[in-house]
Amino acid sequence: MRILLAPDRFAGSLHAVEAVDAIAAGWKRTSPYDEVDRLPLSDGGPGFLDVLCEHVEGEIAVVTVHGPLGEPVPARVLVDGPTAYVEVAEAVGLHLVPATGRDAAGASSEGVGELLAAAVDIGARRVVVGVGGTATTDGGRGMLDALDGVEAGRARLADVELVAATATDAPLMGHSGAAHGFAEGKGADRETREALEQALREWATGTDGGLAVRPGAGAGGGIGFGLLLLGAQRVNGTELVASLAGLDDRVRMVDLAVTGQAVFDWEALRGRVVVAVARAAQRAGRPTVVLCERLEVGRRELSSTGVDAAYAVADTPGGDTGHRSAESLAALAERVARTWSR
């Protein structure tokens, strides 16, 4: 039997490449003769570059930029001919800030502007930016300040094709926007979220409010909006990576697609990796199963996305959602293989 392993990252524990290895190890315990095709994927959030390094031939340059709270951090630029790929989470990711030190109001996207400048200085004519998983909610203001403002930034990038590959289609403001939709997970209480929402509204009003309602403007704490101000074309991060990885062709060559992420919830249904794999498998007439740590959607939602079955670590005998590890995922894969391998 031929199996395609195409998960996203398991946030907080494993990046997609590690998740693929863990699932493969567990699957092989039960079904050692199955042919396993490894295809780690990303939605543009943390781990974007790790996944692209699996699918794109290029060279890595490492630059030092300002982290979310001003500290120096290393960030990579993946250069493939005239195209450079960067990941905003490497510069200002939430994982760079200890849980006890999160400051959604004070964190800046300055490092992303420095990363863009580095990509341009390297000679890139096209820059693809993976947007998601940040500690910031400044609407991209810090990024633009690092480029000396909107007009100067546009001038610097005038001859560069800029692509924002966002992990979400959220607008800048509103219930599902950068502040109210995501800042709580960055340490912002209700009062802080209200203040951030007001600051984003003023920022949009003073620049280009029409861009604020576009899909993806709220990605990365509003870095998506900042990139739109610079003239970026917004694309779905999952679709971009799936295309580069050849998902449609790869799924046609197997009997079963296995995908997954840490928490399979309503947010995962909004154009993320799991849905992309399920739909590609549907087009190819192949079944899809999902592995996750926690399952928070019902059977009806699973069916509507083309998922045939979903399994959670929490439902495995001895499973513990607080113990996120490669071994727990491998154990789940081992159990699922008993049902699906033939």
Image (cartoon, rainbow, N blue to C red):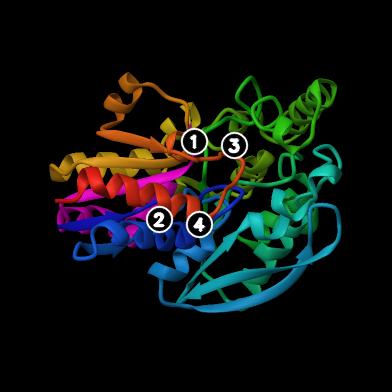
First along the sequence among labels 2 and 1: 2
Among all residues in the image, which is located at the extreme front? 318
SS type, badge 4: helix
- Residue range corresponding to the magenta coloring: 238-264
First along the sequence among labels 1 and 4: 1
Q: Is residue 339 visible?
A: yes
Mark 2–mark 4 Cα distance, whole angstroms, equals 23 Å
First along the sequence among labels 1 and 3: 3
Q: Is residue 159 visible?
A: no
Closer to us: mark 2 or mark 3? 2
Q: Label 2 sits on what residue type?
A: Val
* Quarter residue 283 falls in: top left
Q: Dot 4: few (<14), some (14–19), or many (≥20) neighbours within 10 Å?
A: many
The residue that label 1 is drawn on is 314
Q: Is residue 294 above or below residue 257?
A: above
Q: Residue 256 at x, y = what percent?
A: 20, 49
Q: Closest to the observer: 117 or 241?
A: 241
Q: Dot 2: few (<14), some (14–19), or many (≥20) neighbours within 10 Å?
A: many
The residue that label 4 is drawn on is 326
Q: Is residue 149 above or below residue 267?
A: below
Q: Inspect the magenta stretch and tell me whether residue 244 lies in it.
A: yes
